[in-house]
Image (tube, grey):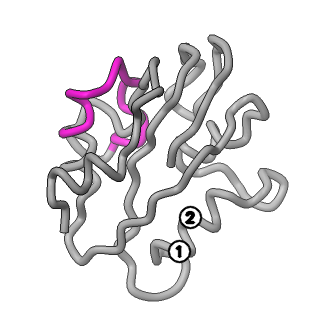
Amino acid sequence: MVLHLNHDKDIQIGKLGKLFFKKGTYLYIGSAMGKVGSVTLENRVRRHLRSPKLKNNHWHIDFLLENKEINLIKLFLIPNKKNLECILAQELLNLSDGFIKKFGSSDCSCKSHLLLFEDTEDFEIVEFLKIRNVK
């Protein structure tokens, strides 16, 4: 998910607490490896995009998306039998301008799955994926 925040803001993110978010564009990398039901990629994304009134916040991204100042810019779905979540997060971390510590990564050893890109004039995740030959 590519998200944008127009100004610096403190946002409450579940058990992570109130976190400071710098203005900029954020890339959230998540995964859903289920083959049927609510845990498929398509259904997980649909759930995240539902109105906060129609769901209980569970994942960090749910808390972020409920904030009206967060704008969803783009979604990239990468159906794959291999879980690429941590691989992509670690690779993209080196290109980012920062990250929100432990966001979306409380179940792995990654620093974060929410990365900040301050200058996004040339930002295009698709090009990165093509270059890296992610399959």
Residue wearing tag 2: 45
Residue pictured at 28% horizontal, 54% vertical: 85
When asked about the image quadrant of residue 110, the answer is: top left
Q: Nearer the viewer, residue 79 or 48?
A: 79
Element at label 2: helix
Q: Amino acid at mark 1?
A: Glu
Q: Look at 39% across and 86% down and name the residue there.
A: 35
Q: Nearer the viewer, residue 110 or 28?
A: 28
Q: Locate residue 37 relative to residue 57 in the image: left or right.
A: left
In the picture shown, does residue 86 fall above or below 54? above
Q: Is mark 2 in CB contact (under 8 Å) with mark 1?
A: yes
Residue furthest out toward the left: 132
**Amino acid marked by disc 2:** Val
The question of residue 58 being in magenta is answered with no
Magenta-colored span? 91-106
Q: Residue at 40% of width from left, 53% of height from top?
A: 30
**Residue at figure coordinates x 33%, y 33% from the top left:** 112
**In the image, residue 115 above or below residue 59:** above
Judge left or right: residue 27 versus residue 60. Answer: left
Residue 99 painted magenta: yes
Q: Position of residue 83 (x, y in %)?
A: 24, 64
- Density class for disc 2 (Cα within 10 Å; few <14, some 14-19, many ≥20) is some
User: Around disc 1, counting alpha carbons within 10 Å, would you say few (fewer than 14), some (14 to 19), or many (20 or more)?
Assistant: some
Q: Taking 2 as reference, is 12 left or right?
A: right
Q: Quadrant of the C terminus?
A: bottom left
User: Dot 1 lies on which element?
Assistant: helix
Magenta highlight: main SS = loop
Q: Which residue is mark 1?
A: 42
Q: Position of residue 113 (x, y in %)?
A: 36, 39
Who is closer to the viewer here, 65 or 88? 88
